[in-house]
Amino acid sequence: MLKTWLTDITGIQYPIIQGGMGPYSTNRLCAAVANAGGLGIISLIGMGVQHSEATPVDPTLVFGDGSTEDYIERSLEYVKNETQTNQGIFGINCPVSIEFIEAAQRLITGVFNQRSADPELQKRLRVIITSAGDPVPWQQTIRATDLLWFHVVPSIYHARRAAKAGVDAIIASGHEGGAHISWQPVHSMVLIPGVAESTSIPVIAAGGICDGHTIAAAFALGAVGIQMGTRFIATRECDFWDVWKQGVLQSTDRDTLVGRGMFGPMRFIKNQSSLKLVEKTTELTPDFFKGQPVELNQDILKLEKQGFAKLLEDDANGALILGGEVAGRIDNLPSVKDLIVQIADQAEEIVKNLPKRCIAASNK
Ligand SMILES: Cc1cc2nc3c(=O)[nH]c(=O)nc-3n(C[C@H](O)[C@H](O)[C@H](O)COP(=O)(O)O)c2cc1C
């Protein structure tokens, strides 16, 4: 049985976190992960930004009547009830980048208010994961609660900022990951050991993880647990549309592209739509790949909105499908429980057998 700082501090069974995947709902996925012994995460940001073509509303994904407070209340209620029998542990994720500050304040305060009025939520909603912005200004608000606080970083520079904020753990998320990624590419193999060496705060690895091999590698690189996004999309319980799950399943290892997303670079699964977006990105913002933020072009934004709207039409070529490089290593659609048990067992086996493969017997 894998046992690390992460399992000890949170009370989860496996050191596996389901990454927040806003602006889409991950309520069902969160409940399934929590029930399976991992840390399920409710993705908050879609409940706070106005729904538009860019965050299409599928009736099956909506929890609530459209107001932020109602979305929050129903989502927390749903996850709490679905995980009651197994006493599943879960958390929330909220990006705190500059574009989202107001929404983030409303969302985080909304969750804290609900939680402080509900002993069951206090017991089982244990973690807040912030991402994408500066964690330092959030110190007072978050430290006024008893929640564990993890922050996602794409570089050692950002890890130092998270350490300054006094977070409990740092999630180091490599550039191969799905959806928004940083302007300056640092992939997991470089990022995770770099962050682990640069701080004494526990590190959780993300970006490119999907199985026992990559979990074992994350431990070797200095992590105490892992977070996965793309792998969890291709599960039966994931809230996302079938066209998205199929996009992940059909990808090979050379099938992702980085183009302009609303708030910076984004990694997409390669199809007609993402190819067009990347073409426009290079044509209209030629400095895009120079590692410094460039302004968002309105024609690109329009294209992006159209692509996200096509998800609702089940249009495999027209839809913009977000996913990480690891999509190329994913070819099955298991239940969340089967996935977690299988990859945790595999990781344990690999860790146990590693000395036989690479340490010479001293007394032969
Ligand atoms: C569709 C999608 C949406 C995402 N949205 C968020 C988000 O709202 N907040 C966040 O912190 N991370 C977000 N992420 C990043 C994931 O939480 C996770 O760190 C990342 O997917 C890990 O890399 P992987 O895709 O290789 O597993 C998103 C990822 C995907 C694929």
Image (cartoon, helix red, strand yellow):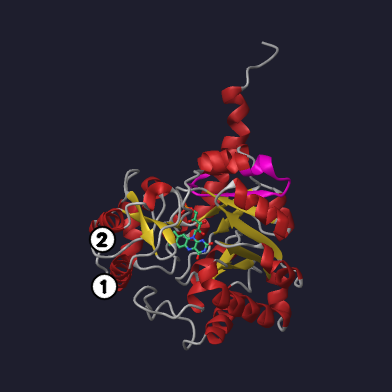
**Does residue 103 lie above or below 222 as drawn?**
below
Residue occupying the point 53% across, 84% down:
68
The image quarter in which residue 62 lies = bottom left
Element under disc 2: helix
Residue 114: give x, y in percent of width and height: 66, 82
Q: Dot 1 surroundings within 10 Å: few (below 14), some, or many (20 or more)?
A: few
Residue occupying the point 56% across, 81% down:
72
- Where, quadrant-wise, is the C terminus in this rendering? top right
At label 1, the amino acid type is Glu
Give the residue number, with chain letter if any, for mark 1. 313
Residue occupying the point 72% across, 67% down:
147
Q: Answer yes or no: is residue 167 visible.
A: no
**Left or right: 245 as drawn, with respect to 67:** left
**Does residue 307 lie above or below 49 as drawn?**
above
Instruction: Write the start and end of the magenta stretch as one range.
Output: 195-212
Q: Nearer the viewer, mark 2 or mark 1?
A: 2
Residue 239 lies in the magenta stretch: no
Task: Measure the C-alpha gap from mark 2 to mark 1.
Answer: 14 Å
**Left or right: 278 as drawn, with respect to 39:** left
The image quarter in which residue 320 lies = bottom left
At label 2, the amino acid type is Ser
Q: Answer yes or no: is residue 249 visible.
A: yes
Give the residue number, with chain letter if any, for mark 2. 273
**Does residue 155 lie above or below 246 as drawn?**
above
Residue 288: give x, y in percent of width and height: 37, 53
Residue 208 lies in the magenta stretch: yes
Residue 191: give x, y in percent of width and height: 56, 43
The earlier-in-sequence mark between 2 and 1 is 2
Element under disc 1: helix
